[in-house]
Image: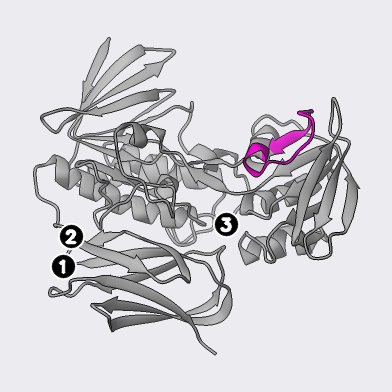
Amino acid sequence: MKKIDCDVLVIGAGGAGLSAAQAAASAGAKVLTVDREEACGGVLCQCIHNGFGLRFFNAELTGPEYALRMERAARESGAEIRCGETVSSVVRRSDGTFEATLFSAADGVTKVESRAAVFTTGCRERTRANIAVPGDRCAGIYTAGSAQKLMNLNGMLPGRRALIVGSGDIGLIMARRCRWSGIEVAAVIEILPEPSGLPRNIAQCLRDFDIPLLLSHRCRKIIGRNRVEAAEVENMTTGEVMTFKCDTILFSVGLIPENELLKAMGAKLNPATGGPGVDSSLQCSVPGVFAAGNSLHVHDLVDFASLEARRAGESAARYASGAGLPAAELPVSCSRSLKYVVPGRCAAGESCEFFFRPTVSCRRAKLSFLADGSEIAKKMCVSVRPAEMLTMKADVPAEAKNLSFELEECK
């Protein structure tokens, strides 16, 4: 059995994990990054379309190009990266250090000892089972991400005529990808009255290719015994039921943060995000454990995940060195027009960047930062919708006792 010692263990080598590794190594920590896949990048490797890196690199890149830049930066900073390694458990020992157990085909079992851990394990797709669509378990049913991997990495077509359930960004991008590959797309259906994906993807992936988007519609039943033959689609407003002939159905119905390892460690989760509750250092309820990226809360852009993970890496390096972190004891809450605010706790007198997911849609809104009920900062937001995250940098007053955010529509 091999044993490895490091200051910071980063679990997950996607965009967030590589950013955290680079930041921690640049701060002087000995960093080990592990990922169960055979190559770095996570889901970026199968995203061959462009649009990545506009905020983080000030350049428009494809997913693999973004991943390559992140990997190169992490390695050049001194971080060690091991792919094909699955982390089965992480235990916090009585002395405050951590022991992780890794499995790989090449090395068998490896034990890793670290002084801090950063979880950037990403998220998984919700499936047909999560939304309880009846019908046989026939061939031709995929999540949008699995179909994307099948096409972009394996060079295989999932079918000839597809129906896409859900208007999440991966589903929208796959609608375009299907058309490029000669697969007819019957429609994209969405149970909500507005799309779940980014406006740019609605325009570039659906409107530019004349693919129908049916809002307030749901998949009522899948028809087919051995292979998908059709799907029954119901109009939620009128009750009308339509039958779409298809041999393939792609589900793009949301993402779930992957936090099984954190739950096993006893970390407290935030029910609003599905990820752990964190303070302004992105430290979880377990001391020395940090989280960032889609395992913390689902982002709409990998650039945001990478920027957030940079802070987690810096905090982990500081913790591992023995330097103290700010005492983040001030609770942060938000109004009903915001689904959540991350982080949920801050230290008095520090500057912090906050992330939000709105629950409302409007053309203009004011995002207000309140300390003990008094507004101390504001930001005007244009074209607010649940599909797009909001961010705000703010200075926390040294004398504050309670912090909150409000989002109000401007008439």
Which amino acid, mark 3? Gly
Q: How many marks?
A: 3
Magenta stretch? 128-142
Pointer 3 residue: 51
Q: Earlier in the sequence, mark 3 or mark 2?
A: 3
Q: Residue at x 39, y 76 (%)?
A: 406
Q: Secondary structure at mark 3?
A: loop
In percent of width and height, residue 339 lies at: 46, 63
Q: Is residue 41 left or right of residue 369?
A: right
Which amino acid, mark 1? Ala
Pointer 2 residue: 329
Q: Earlier in the sequence, mark 1 or mark 3?
A: 3
Labels 3, 2: front one: 2
Which amino acid, mark 2? Glu
Q: Residue at x 46, y 81 (%)?
A: 408
Pointer 1 residue: 348
Residue 132 falls inside the magenta stretch:
yes
